[in-house]
Image (cartoon, rainbow, N blue to C red):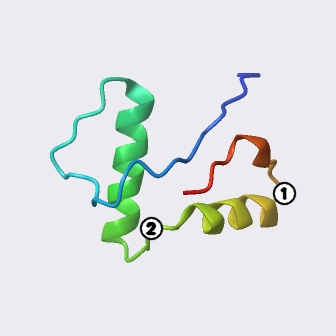
Amino acid sequence: MGARVQIRVERLNDDVVVDHYQPRIEIGRLAQAARQASIQAGGKLLAAHEIKEAVRRRGGVFDDSTTHSH
């Protein structure tokens, strides 16, 4: 492996993600499948600040310089 992955969370708009959206690449399909599985298991979607806090709690690195406030 040895690969680093950077995930950037941005608010696109205030609309709910459309269920018929089809990602074009494999990582997008995997992310969408994980999202659907989490929702079906009773999970809730997190706001950007909640994601940052969860990443920090788990010892991950979150680069605030790329975060834009809306």
Task: Note whether residue 63 is visible.
Answer: no
Point out the tag, 2 or 1, that comes first from the N-terminus. Answer: 2
Would residue 50 appear left or right of 65 to someone viewing this image?
left
Q: Secondary structure at mark 1?
A: loop
In the image as oriented, which residue stretches furthest toward the left?
20
For image coordinates 34% across by 61% down, the residue present is 14
Question: Observer-nearest residue: 42 or 17?
Answer: 17
The residue to which callout 2 is attached is: 45
Position above or below: 17 against 3: below
The residue to which callout 1 is attached is: 59
Would residue 48 appear left or right of 21 to someone viewing this image?
right
Question: Observer-nearest residue: 25 or 8?
Answer: 8
Task: Note whether residue 31 is visible.
Answer: yes
Position above or below: 50 against 8: below
- Residue 25, which numbered label? none
Question: Observer-nearest residue: 1 or 18?
Answer: 18
Q: Secondary structure at mark 2?
A: loop
- Residue 33 pos. (x, y %): 34, 47
For image coordinates 80% across by 61% down, the residue present is 56
- Residue 11 pos. (x, y %): 47, 52
